[in-house]
Image (spheres, grey):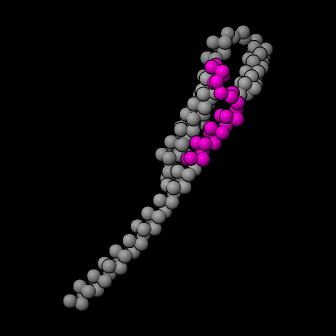
Amino acid sequence: MKDVIMLVTEIINILHDLLIEKFGVNMSDKDLHFWIIGIIGMISFFMVFYSFKLISKLKWHVSILSFIYTFTMMVVLVFAIEIQQAITNRGNKEFADAVIGLWGFIVFFTVYTFLVITIYFVSKIIKNSTYKKDIEYTKRTERYNKQK
């Protein structure tokens, strides 16, 4: 975990230095955060907006969007727990812990998905067979009424 954070920090420092060298603008950390996070945020917003717009046209769109939101929330929670462990010196501070925690969510969600799909198709089969029986009953009733 510490190695990943150090790598991200190093990449950010390199980008910071490149921006200062290329543009010759000496920005404070607050200025840099304002511009970079603002730009990354807007790029992310448009990517998410158009992706969600496409997803909203699908049959299971609410479930898909709920999964994406929950997964994002779980990523934040997992890394918050890892940071808390680093601050309090409790538990192992490993990136693998975060990954396995997210895998736990994915496995449980996959089981849930299979259950929902199974129930959906079983109910559809039952509904179709009941519908066919209703049609047969209606035809028999019509024939019987014509004979009277």
Q: Is 95 within the magenta?
A: yes
Q: Is residue 7 visible?
A: yes
Relative to 6, 33 lies left or right = left
Residue at 61% across, 23% down: 84
Q: Is residue 39 visible?
A: no
Of residues 21 and 127, the one drawn nearer to the viewer in this rendering: 127
Q: Residue furthest bottom?
A: 147
Q: Is 104 within the magenta?
A: yes
Q: Position of residue 77 (x, y in %)?
A: 57, 30
Above or below, comparing residue 90 to residue 133 in the picture: above
Quadrant including the C terminus: bottom left
Residue 131 location, quadrant: bottom left
Q: Position of residue 74 (x, y in %)?
A: 57, 35
Quadrant including the N terminus: top right
Q: Position of residue 5 (x, y in %)?
A: 71, 24
Residue at 66% across, 21% down: 89
Of residues 142 and 64, the one drawn nearer to the viewer in this rendering: 64
Residue at 75% across, 26% down: 3
Disc tally is 0
Q: Which residues are magenta?
A: 85-109
Residue 10 location, quadrant: top right
Of residues 136 and 77, the one drawn nearer to the viewer in this rendering: 77
Residue at 69% across, 11% down: 27
Q: Position of residue 123 (x, y in %)?
A: 44, 63
